[in-house]
Every structure is written in structure tokens, then in C-alpha cells.
Amino acid sequence: QVLLVESGGGLVQTGGSLRLSCAASGRTLGAYTMGWFRRTPGKDREWVAVISPSGGSTYYTDSVKGRFTISRDNAENTVLLQMNSLKAEDTAVYYCAAGDSSLHSGAYTRAIDYDYWGQGTQVTVSS
């Protein structure tokens, strides 16, 4: 099993920046596709970003393109989400997720493509 713990959330004004971190234990992340999701009240988890096991490929949902950057450091067993130019609509609980790339063949834009989840970290963007 893989234990994922997110950190770095908080309160920030519109236009500000935050960097979320996801630290993993139990297994190394080298074989896992890593993603970030977010959830707001009354909605299902929304896919935000994904990075391939080696870090060579990244993809983002349209609403965050050009503002968010996902990265990983497999030696440190961490995944980051740099969030810039934050907007009020970015307010949500953000979750880190790991998908076993040997078990899934999907696009990793759905929650069903992931096997392990963190507890989430709250991001609040105020005007």
C-alpha cells in the first residue's frame, strides 16, 4: 500500500500562489502515475493534473492550463502542484492520488484510474 499526505494548502488572495506537496511512504512512486484532483461542496472529484511515472508527460484540465504546474521528484518520493494566478473558483479541497501504471490503461483523468488517495488539503482563494 501507499500512504499519501498532502500539505501546503491555506488561504490566499486572488492572484496569489501556493505550492502543494504530496509525500508518499510505503512504496516508491517510480511506477505510479500521479494526479491531483479537487472537490468542492456538492460536486464529485474533478481531475486537475497528471504526470507520468518518469515525469516526461504532463496534462492539465483546461481551467488551470498556464497557471498550474505538476512536477515530481522520484528520489524524494514527492509530487508537487505549483498554483499561480489563483482565482476564487480554485477554492477546493485538493487531493493527491497514485495510480499503478501496470494495472490501468486509461487516460488518468478519472478517479477510477487511481488506487491510493491522500486525505486532502484545503485551498481557499479570497477576493
Image: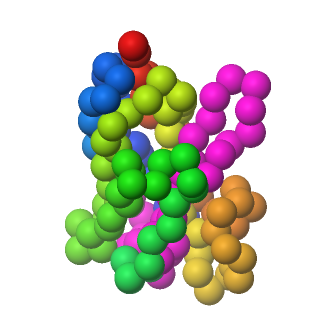
Which residue lies most toward the left here?
76
Q: Identify whether 48 is placed above or below 60.
A: above
Specify the quadrant of the image occupied by residue 56.
bottom left
Comparing 83 with 65, the one in front is: 65
Question: In this image, 110 relative to 19: left or right?
Answer: right
Question: In this image, 116 relative to 81: left or right?
Answer: right
Instruction: Report the number of discs.
Output: 0
Q: Identify whether 71 is placed above or below 125.
A: below
Which residue lies most toward the top here?
127
- The image shows residue 90 at horizontal and vertical percentages of 49, 33
- The image shows residue 22 at horizontal and vertical percentages of 37, 51
Q: Is residue 13 magenta?
A: no
Residue at x 71%, y 76% (from the top left corner): 106
- The image shows residue 71 at horizontal and vertical percentages of 33, 64
Question: In this image, 111 relative to 66: left or right?
Answer: right
Residue at x 45%, y 71% (from the top left corner): 58
Residue at x 58%, y 81% (from the top left corner): 101
Q: Quadrant of the C terminus?
A: top left
User: Visible in this render: residue 80?
Assistant: yes
Residue at x 43%, y 22% (from the top left corner): 124
Specify the quadrant of the image occupied by residue 86.
top left
Which residue lies most toward the bottom here?
102
- The image shows residue 111 at horizontal and vertical percentages of 70, 56
Comparing 52 with 83, the one in front is: 83
Comparing 74 with 50, the one in front is: 50
- The image's colouring method is rainbow
- Region of the chain picked out in magenta, as a range: 23-52
User: Visible in this render: residue 3?
Assistant: no
Q: Quadrant of the N terminus?
A: bottom right
